[in-house]
Image (spheres, rainbow, N blue to C red):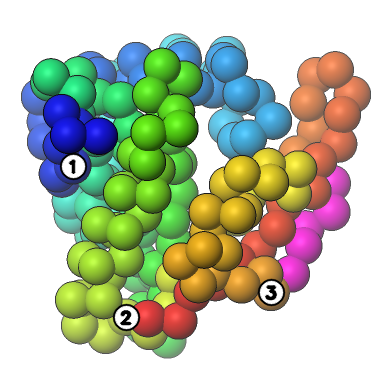
Amino acid sequence: MAEVSIRPMLEPDLLGYKALRDAILAGHPEAFTSDAETESLRDLASYRSRLAGGTNGGTLFTLVALDRGRVVGALTCEREPRRKVQHIAHLVGMMVADTHRGRGIGRALLAATIARLQATDGLAQVTLSVTTSNRAAIGLYESVGFTRYGRLPDAIRLPDGRRLDKDLMALRL
C-alpha cells in the first residue's frame, strides 16, 4: 500500500469520489442501502455534504484513499446533530475500488477514521451497519473491536427478489 495515501476528502476529489461510488454501487448492490440507478443521477454538487462540516455539521469528515491522485477508497463519518446523542458517530459508505481490494486500504481507512474519532471531543462510540452476508467486512470490523449489537432483518430488498439482513455494530471509543 506504499503508493496509496489517506487524507480528508477535498472539493477537487468529488469527481473521483462520485466515479468510485457509482462503480461500487453498480458492482456490489448487496453491500449498500443506496441503489446504483438512483445515485448515478445525483449531481456532483450533492456530494459536497460529504466534506468536513457537511450539511448542518452532520458530516464530521470523509477520508479518501488516493493512488497516484485517483480516489480508490473512501469512508464517511457522520455525527448525530441532536444534543442527547451527539456522543455517537456513524460510519457510512466504506468503499474500496475492486482493482485495489486485498491491499489493506479498507483497514487503513478504518484505522485513520477511528484515530480521528478518538481525538474528537465528546464522542463515546461509533456505529455502522453491514450486510450480514459480507463476512470479509464483518471480519475487518470485528478485528478492530466492533461488536454486533443487533440485526435488522429484511433491511435491503434487491430487484432480483433477494432480501438481505444488516448487522448493527458498535465500537466504544
Q: Viewer-proximal residue, 160 or 72?
A: 72
Foreground residue among 132 and 88: 132
Q: Mark 1 Cα within 10 Å, few/some/many (few <14, many 20+)? A: some
Residue indicated by mark 3: 149
Q: Mark 3 is on which residue type?
A: Tyr
Residue type at tag 2 = Leu
- Please state which of the two labelled residues, at mark 1 or mark 2, is closer to the viewer: 1
Rendered location of residue 151, percent (x, y): 77, 62
Horizontal side of residue 141 vs 163, given as left or right: left
Q: Which of marks 2 and 3 is nearer the N terminus?
A: 2
Query: Which amino acid does the dot numbered 1 rest on?
Result: Ile
Mark 2 Cα-neighbour bin, 10 Å: few <14, some 14–19, many ≥20:
some
**Disc 1 designates what residue?**
6
Q: How far apart are marks 2 and 3 (CA)?
A: 18 Å
If you read the primary sequence from the N terminus, does the residue marked by circle 3 or circle 1 appear first? 1
**Residue 123's disc number:** 2
The magenta stretch is 150-154
Q: Is residue 130 above or below residue 161?
A: below
Identify the element where label 1 is drawn: strand
